[in-house]
Amino acid sequence: MHYLAIALVSVLMVSVSGCSKTTDKAMEGEFYFVNNTAHHISFSSGFEKYNLAPNSISPAFIVSDISDKSITEPSFYAPFLKENAYKLPAEPIIMRFENSKCVVIRNMLGNRNPLNINSYSSERLTERKFKFTYTFTESDYIEAPACQ
């Protein structure tokens, strides 16, 4: 009986010490698209459509999620990936400049890519909230090939 009591206490202590409580907390990203070109830009992903007049800023696109760890810029995904359960969209994103020049985006590669969170400038607003800005430049327009 004495051994049974010791075994029962040991099992109870191991099971209690093995449990740790994690608390998920909300995190939020405000995403903005800035058009610093003299050209109208349009693009879509899923049901979301974006139209940026020349030299304008888009309304905020809010991405919310939860996490149990400290929040840094790489904790976030670009809005297009959040809409698709953090996977690349099935259809490529096509950015159109005046419907004459197009950029087709199929992956997250490159440092000038709206699917790559590292392509955004970021600013911490609170402990768990960031502002991200992607800026289209005149160089983006110049380097874009003609639409097919």
Image (cartoon, grey):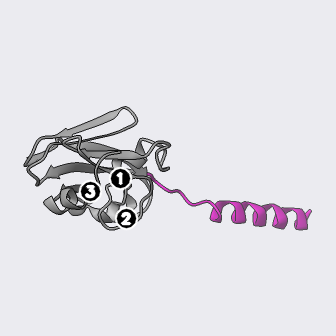
Q: Say what secondary structure mark 2 lies in.
A: helix
Crowd around label 2: few <14 · some 14–19 · many ≥20 (10 Å): few
Residue 106: image location, x then y, percent: 44, 53
Image: 48 above or below 33: above
Q: Which residues are magenta?
A: 1-24
Q: Is residue 22 magenta?
A: yes
Q: Is residue 129 above or below residue 96?
A: below
Residue wearing tag 3 = 144
The amino acid type found where label 3 is placed reads Ala
The residue drawn where x is 49% and y is 45% is 85
Residue kind at label 1, given as amino acid type: Ala
Q: Quadrant of the C terminus?
A: top left
Q: Position of residue 95 (x, y in %)?
A: 29, 47
Residue placed furthest toward the right:
1
Per the image, the residue denoted by label 1 is 78
Does residue 100 appear to the left or right of 1 in the view shown? left
Tell me the mark number nearer the camera, choosing from 1 and 2. Answer: 1
**In front here: 38 or 67?**
38
Whether residue 80 is visible here, answered yes or no, is: yes
Residue identifier under label 2: 74
Q: Nearer the viewer, residue 133 or 17?
A: 133
Between the C-alphas of marks 1 and 2, the distance is 10 Å
Q: Earlier in the sequence, mark 1 or mark 3?
A: 1
Dot 1 crowding, Cα within 10 Å, few <14, some 14–19, many 20+: many
- Front-lying residue, 6 or 84: 84
- Residue 38 spot, x, y in % from top left: 8, 50
The reply to whether residue 72 is visible in this rendering is no
Give the Cα distance between marks 3 and 2.
Answer: 27 Å
Q: Main secondary structure of the magenta part?
A: helix
